[in-house]
Image (cartoon, helix red, strand yellow):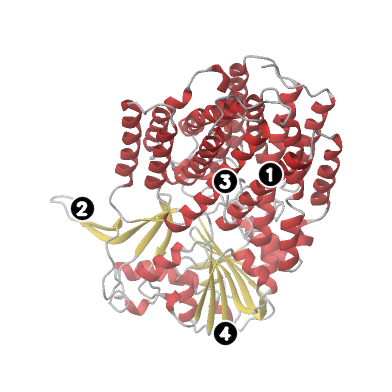
Amino acid sequence: MTVASPTSGGAGWRLFALSFTALFLELMVIRWVPSEVRMVAYYANLLLISSFLGLGVGALVSSRGWNLFRLFPLLFAADIVLLLWLGNDLLPSGAGEFRFGATQGSFRGHLCLLLVFFANAAMFAPLGEAVGRQFARLPALRAYSWDLAGSLAGTLAFGLFSLLSFSPLIGLTAVMLVVLLLGERRPSGWSVAAGVAAIGAVWLASGHREIFWSPYYYITVDESYLVTENPPGGTFRQYVADRPASAPPAALKTMRDPPIYTLRVNQDFYQMHGTVDLSRYTVAGWRYDMIAAMYEQYRLPYRLIGRPERVLVLGAGGGMDVETALLNGAGHVDAVEIDPTIPRISNRLSASAPYLDPRVTLHVGDGRAFLQRTTGQFDLVAFGYLDSQALFSYGANVRLDGYIYTVESFRQAYRHVREGGVMAVWFFGGREWLMRKLAHMVTEATGSEPLVYMNHGALAIIAPKGATAHPASRTVDKWTLVAAGKGSIALATDDWPYLYLERRGIPTDYAIVIGLLAALSVIAVGTLRGRGFGSADGHFLFLGWGFLLLQAKGIGDCSLYFGGTWLVTTMVITGVLLMVLLANWTALRFLRGFNPWLYAPLFLTLLALLLVPRETILAQSFGFRLGWTLLAVPLPIFFAGLIFSTTFRTARNPSALFGANLIGATLGGFSEYLGMWTGSQALGYLVLTAYAASLLCMRRGFQGPPK
């Protein structure tokens, strides 16, 4: 057992501060980097993995006396400069995966991803080294308690920071100041200069336009305007362009020809904000032409059902489809939008302000969760353009709209459609296979083939329930009825929520990037360790592997039960840390040593989560789902925490084994991508395998590595 050294005074609080800073910075870069480097948007969880790698490597070398911590300001600045330099690189397209705004894949794009990954890992290595040094100054379990408490505080602080006013400038500045204060010596001039330069670069890159930080996106707003070019001797032409939006006109809600705004997320087009009331625009004007095309797509289902009494819009966004419902005589509209910032922007910039209409009820939250709890029946249930451009959590590789576009979700929505009403699914920019996939999913959910309309790149799938008020036409405005197409295709389900994948499997570019990262990570760790890999290392590595997979699966399950919102994710991570902290406290107070029988309840609870279908839990009441989430889901984490703490207590070199645990979490993060092939439930068997491997290492004879 490690004993406290004579210099261990204050080591606990220092470890708390370091763990707090590491966790806060980890969440900070995961939140900020995709907004700066567009290509990282669909690889955001790689930043989590690389953070674990950096912390693990730092902990492994903490006994070498390298003093990497003094290099943190320089690595911090270098990482930020790299990110800003790569900011204009385009997102590479993936073979078999649809990505919004993607270009043809290139070697440069994937090389940039590798650079982002390893630069982020390098930035976290000094923090890992400092954490490892504090582990050497304290008894192992006390050190682990301080580490967990700091991580928990960092999670809660970042959640509050994001809720109040997320700003990378403020967050990164706070991290830099804390690190300078944590230095064992007075910070050198070059350290301060590097930190100031890094923060200054972030400030300059942010520009001087108005920026909105929502819980999910970095949002900017542009205003559309008409450009007229008539050069001497040249060709006269006019086209619509965008410029940074200025303050809206005072008479916006009543003026003629009001402005049209473009909302961008993470620097890419997302949606339009304005009014679709054509009477507000001059006929044949450029604004009229833009809005007429948008109004035509939203009013398509009303050609079938006539005047609706009640409408549900999932993914209401700026409110144009909500306003269309009102213009077509809807008595009441329930509008569901997951991002609270977007309706606030709409209330300010929309010339119609649909969310302020007394006939509209705005529900800020997850659309799938709303379908789960509502008892209402609607003439129209509309899936707006929910096409997300980010992952819903840094702990999973499922997109924000993953559990909305599934067969089960469509089936649930169709149950809320009144007889004679319709369910409508809009989509834009998809490929031919994506159109067929959506149509086949609606067919599977409703039991009959829907009406599929196309208008250039836009898709509208209409699923009537019984006879509608008006028969379907082959052409409606510029929409044309088309055949959905035949052929087998992998349908997105709650277990495999990957609408944007053409087929089951890991896309080639993911496999290449992850394979290279995993290989280079293993080589780097093996080189830096400088000694053999023993059973103790394997034990803690597989514990870390199983833990991260278990956490990812827990985030996915809870997001399905309660919605894929940032709040649910934050609560799950907080609950995981609390459960591990409770296990560590239990080991300190009541358990004197490791007992192999602790694996029995771990395996039993894991099997229970595997054998009880998630659809069974989803079909239960809110109270039952909450109880299951609070009691059954965290139990494996608690028992795994007991195993970790009781074996960690007798470790001869806790910092090295803590590093091995973090490296295991890195490999667990990589293997989470297997869910793209197997589905999320099957990952539970991989969790079982990881914990069985840790038990096997114990049976071979657990001996801590020599000092």
Q: Which residue is drawn at 47% across and 68% down?
A: 478
Question: Is 380 left, or right, of 640 in this rendering?
Answer: left
Q: What element carries label 4?
A: loop
First in sequence: mark 1 or mark 2? 2
Q: Mark 1 points at which residue?
A: 580
First in sequence: mark 3 or mark 2? 2
Q: How crowded is mark 1: few (under 14 residues within 10 Å), some or many (20 or more)?
A: many
Amino acid type, label 2: Thr
| Quarter of the image where one finds residue 462 | bottom right
Mark 1–mark 4 Cα distance, whole angstroms, equals 51 Å
Nearer-the-camera pick, 350 or 164: 164
Task: Between label 4 and label 3, give the one nearer the viewer.
Answer: 3
Q: Are marks 1 and 2 in contact (CB under 8 Å)?
A: no
Q: Residues within 10 Å of mark 4 (few under 14, many from 20)?
A: some
Q: Do the residues labelled 1 and 4 touch (CB within 8 Å)?
A: no
Task: Between label 3 and label 2, give the one nearer the viewer.
Answer: 3
Can the viewer see residue 444 in this picture? no
Q: Name the residue under label 2.
A: 235
First in sequence: mark 3 or mark 1? 3
Residue 556, given in percent of the width and then of the height, sits at 66, 52
Task: Between label 2 and label 4, give the one nearer the viewer.
Answer: 4
Residue 125, given in percent of the width and then of the height, sits at 52, 28
First in sequence: mark 1 or mark 4? 4
Task: Between label 1 and label 2, give the one nearer the viewer.
Answer: 1
Q: Name the residue under label 4.
A: 309
Q: Residue 394 carries which label?
A: 3
